[in-house]
Image (cartoon, rainbow, N blue to C red):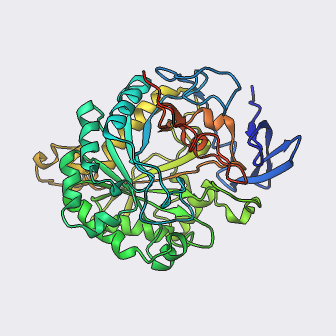
Amino acid sequence: MSRIPRSVCPVCLAPIPARHETMDDDTYLIKTCPTHGEFKTIVWRGLPGFREWSRTKVPSQPKTPFTEVDQGCPMDCGLCDAHRQHTCTAVFEITWRCDLGCPVCFASSGKLAPADPTQEEFDRLLDRVKLASGFCNIQLSGGEPTMRKDLADLIRMAKDKGFPFVQLNTNGLRLGRKSGYAETLAKAGLDSVFLQFDGTEDAIYTALRGKALLKDKLAAIENLARAGVGIVLVPTVVPGINDHNLGAVVDLAAQNSPGVRGVHFQPVSYFGRYPEAPADVQRITLPELMRLLEQQTKGSIRADHFLPPGCEHSHCSCHANYMVAEDRTLKKLSSGGKCDCTPRPAEEGADKAKAFVKRQWAAPEKALPLVAEVPQPKDDLDRFIARAATHTLAVSAMAFQDAWTLDLERLKGCCIHIVSPDGRLIPFCAYNLSSMDGETLYRGKCHEPSHP
């Protein structure tokens, strides 16, 4: 039985009916608000096809829903008891301060930021996540988390609570500039860094971040690798700005293996105030990323290497895994191609995703403490196995949704949840959702404390 898509109006954010239409391998989301008219937005360009990429999952309810269904998705987030996936990654915004002012910022961070959450409030929110979803992976975000002087204390608190994997989402400036800072965070228990890394050219950073930052980014990679913290490079991909540079980022990641554990591309999403709808030429979709990577890596990465996710909705992301050979070329590890389309439990996909992230995105000596004890390889197969135990590189992409592209079916399968100040867990795209004039549903509106 085919599903009937629903979305929201980009002007008033009211839930409205929607439909997908495919024309010459391009798929559009089309919706009509009775007050504000029709909207048509590209969501999928070319092959692999939109329908062929689809995978059905058996829903998995959150362990402890905090809200009930009242007005319907996306108005009841908390998580509500109709959500179809529990938390894989819980994101804590531990500050709203930042030392940059990027126009593509999810959090709209600025100088007029409210006070940081206290350590007591952070401790309470950790307990809320444990109650809601158990010991999932957590990410400390912002704003810019390194603006907090007590960041190491927060990392230590999360680890002492029993959370197995702690990742930092950062622009990397302080990590690149301050000697010994990466080691301090590593000693506190930091496993991985999601490093904002938009490209290998300073012109890209000037366009997206307002400054030439490549030197700082490379210094951060060097310092984190030395400290034994796994590094994931995270480019925000904007057509006409850095879509020509994707292969170069992957090549830089391979050159810095095994310190760099992955590259996680994020096609630009349009949160904030956009009085005019972004044009389709301003968007880049997952299949385009796959094909561009194939072109720019001269086929060492291929579009048919990529697979749909097992955790979130299939149209949200793609991934492929590689071994970095001694000559720094990539050897495919993931199966790629056609896969078993039998519906699998969403919970199974989430558990596998959490385990993979912990294993792959942490530094190899953390993920595989016995690697040093492996005997010296004696033949080609032994060398391959030993190399694959340490020098692996995950290449992935996540297509976040905005008011024009939001598909409520995808939102219900979200496994990346922001922990709001009042203790609710809210799907990432719902928390950041904003209308054309910048009005939000959740961000900036979840201030009242709520206790378990």
The percent coordinates of residue 185 (x first, y second) are 23, 52
Which residue lies at the image location 58% right of the left edge and 46% below the top edge? 432
Q: Nearer the viewer, residue 400 or 395?
A: 400
Percent position (x, y) of residue 128? 41, 27
State the count of labels.
0
Tell me: residue 66, above or below residue 258.
above
In which quadrant of the rendered image does the N terminus lie?
A: top right
**Residue at the location (32% across, 35% down)?**
120
Residue located at (36% from left, 69% from top): 217
- Residue 55 visible, this angle: no
Hey, which quadrant is residue 410 in on the image?
top right
Which quadrant of the view contains residue 233? Answer: bottom left
- Left or right, 364 with reference to 422: left
Q: Is residue 116 above or below residue 84?
A: below
**Could you tell me which quadrant the C terminus lies in?**
top left
- Residue 49 image offset from top left, x and y in percent: 68, 49
Query: Left or right of 99: which side holds 44?
Result: right
Left or right, 202 with reference to 11 = left
Asked if one can make out residue 429 in the rendered structure from this viewpoint, the answer is yes
Name the residue nearer the viewer: 125 or 389.
Answer: 125
Question: In the image, residue 265 lies at what x, y percent?
Answer: 50, 57
